[in-house]
Image: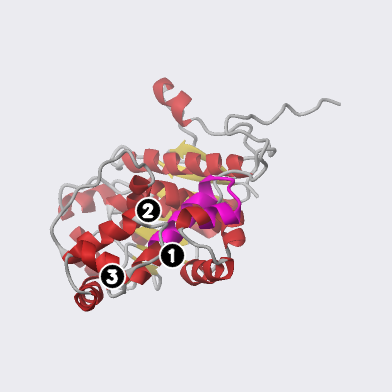
Amino acid sequence: MSARIDLLFSPDCMSGALFNTIDVLRSANIVWRLRNPGSRNWPLYWRLIDASGATLPLPAWLANTLALPEPEPEFSPEQTALFVPGLAMRSVPHLTQLLNNAEAEIALIAARHAAGSVIAASYTGPAMLARAGILDGRNATITWLIVGWFSRNFPQVRLMMDRPMTIDGSLFCAGAPASHISLALALVRHFAGDEVAQTCANSLLYEPLRFEQSGLMLTELPLTTRDGVVYKAKQWLEQHIVEPYSLEAAAQAAAVSTRTLLRYFHDVLSMTPLDYLHKLRIERAKQLLELTLFDLPRIMEICGYQDASAFRRLFRRETGLTPSEYRRRYAVRSTRRWWRADDAPSPAKRN
């Protein structure tokens, strides 16, 4: 089922959040087509709207880049979301003035919520939701810059400042401007499902271990050296990921005893060197399952495993899924071997 995200533009909004959201939605559609190459449908549509709900045309220089899929179907309110970017405030008094000038936008937010749409807001945007009266008794988060003012003016809202994003029913809130991507991914997950959202997250969000593994798979990139027992041992394990595990060899590379290495790993990483090696291997396996058509024996070989049952057990322990389940959920493209990434769906047959 398709959905449409309406992006609320106002002269005082942080418009970059709107374009970031479109980038995520476009990425989700690309993932969908890669996974469903024969489909002529799009899961996500979007449009830029003003306070009256009217569609705003994109400038010509943006239209070609950010154009929405065509043709657009009809949507019920439950198949739509309203994305409310933050207001670009200079101070709390300035924010109060901006809110006073945003009566039309606040009325639109209230009406869309009453109709059954999902409402998502970021940075100072949740203040507009609170003004609309839709956050009373609900969980929300907001930028730390105005948390004192917000809690005094909207005491009925349950602020959750210990988390970057909150989801309470059909209300999605994010505090930091940098959380725009996560908020957009939450909308993707809500409307297009966990598999598409997670695949997008794997591509768009920074995960240190994943980036490290990507570098290790490009053998032409040199590895820098640093002092430090754990760092040296980690480097050795990463460079010998396909070889049989040897605590003695890892300790020798770090120039310490095996007992000292175990103690350092426990103190710094709360795990053993073997646990770290398994995490490296499983992360590599996840990337290969997502990006390649290699069969399981080949992936096991690349990741340093010979025992299929042990590999499946470790993979399930780390991910909660079997390798085949993980590939079905998160593979970037269809598993049909004849298909290429640049293939386009064939035109519909005419009767």
In this orientation, which residue lies closer to the viewer: 214 or 250?
A: 250
Residue annotated with mark 3: 248
Residue annotated with mark 1: 167
Q: Which residues are magenta?
A: 280-300
Residue type at mark 3?
Answer: Glu
**Eyeballing the image, is 8 above or below 273?**
above
Indicate which disc, 1 or 2, sits on the residue closer to the N terminus.
1
Residue type at mark 2?
Answer: Arg
Rounded to the nearest angstrom, the CA distance separating label 1 from label 2 is 27 Å
Q: Quadrant of the C terminus?
A: top right
Which type of secondary structure does the marked residue at label 2 adopt?
helix
- Residue 9 location, x and y as percent? 38, 40
**Eyeballing the image, is 197 above or below 66?**
below
**Residue 203 — which label?**
none
- Residue 46 location, x and y as percent? 51, 40
Rounded to the nearest angstrom, the CA distance separating label 2 from label 3 is 26 Å
Q: Within the magenta stretch, is there residue 285? A: yes
Q: Do labels 1 and 2 touch, CB within 8 Å?
A: no
- Residue in view at x 22 percent, y 78 percent: 259
Indicate which disc, 2 or 3, sits on the residue closer to the N terminus.
2
**Eyeballing the image, is 14 above or below 240?**
above
